[in-house]
Image (tube, helix red, strand yellow):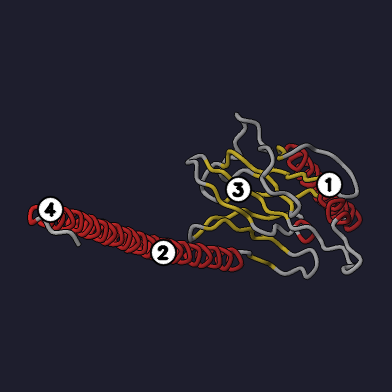
Amino acid sequence: MKKKNIITVLAIILCMSLFAGCSKKEESEKKKELAEELKTIGSEVEGENVYKVALENKTGKDIISVSVKDSSMTEYPANMLAPDDAFVKDEKRNLFYDSTSAIEAAKAAQTDAAKAILDPQYDIQLVFDDQSTLVLNAFPFTDIKEGEICLEDAVAFVKYKSVATKEEISTKDAELNIRAQAEAAAEEAKRQEEEARRQAEEEARKQAEEEARRQAEESRRQAEEARRQAEEEAKRQQQQSSGGNTQEGCVGDGLIY
């Protein structure tokens, strides 16, 4: 009887082990299938300089455009999403980005004075379905494998677990600082523009006053010249008139001088 009970218990344990093993295998396969089913942002390629990051859209809005610009570029390149393939809210996708051209540009910019090659900076521009645009500044491609794109206080940022430190990181404060610096720069530019406008108006006023003074001086000079010429003409006519009257008097009197 005891032997039968032992065999039964062993059979139950074996079934439980097999069931647990099957469950773990199924769970692993399910995770693998889910990972494989993730849609992509950008072209799915492989290579030494290719980054792959699983990103979840937690912004609460659909993203209709994603564009990555490295520090050698002046403008954002083409949208990495198809026109009818929005990155919808709460969706998770794999972002693929080939940094080869960025690294080559950094090497080309290397000088004798700066022997070290500076790592390129990558900014990701996001356009939402309400046509608003935000930027993930200095996206940490080298330190992220998986993360969330979030939107709070009018800034987009990422939350992720650091590959280097294993710490949970949020770039929100950094994005807020960047926005504050941009707003301060814009305010300073506005102040300088206003100062330049004021100086231009002041210079225009001074030039107008100087031109008015010059014209007034020229008018006064012309008036003075006209008066002088009129006086000289009057004197000349008077002299001519006086000379003619004297000659007639002499002839009339029959006197010879």
Dots 2, 1 in contact, CB < 8 A: no
Q: Amino acid at mark 3?
A: Asn
First of labels 2, 4 by sequence position:
2
Picture coordinates of residue 125 (x, y %)? Answer: 62, 48
First of labels 1, 4 by sequence position:
1
Q: Is residue 15 visible?
A: no
Picture coordinates of residue 34 (x, y %)? Answer: 73, 41
Residue farthest top in this picture: 84
Q: Mark 1 or 4, which is nearer the eye?
A: 4
Q: Is residue 215 left or right of residue 80?
A: left
Q: Mark 2 or 1, which is nearer the eye?
A: 2
Q: Secondary structure at mark 4?
A: helix
First of labels 3, 4 by sequence position:
3
Q: Mark 2 or 4, which is nearer the eye?
A: 4
Q: Pointer 1: residues within 10 angstroms few (<14), some, or many (20+)? A: few
Q: CA distance from mark 2 to mark 3?
A: 54 Å
Tag of residue 251: 4
Q: Mark 1 or 3, which is nearer the eye?
A: 1
First of labels 2, 3 by sequence position:
3
Tag of residue 101: 1
Dots 2, 4 in contact, CB < 8 A: no
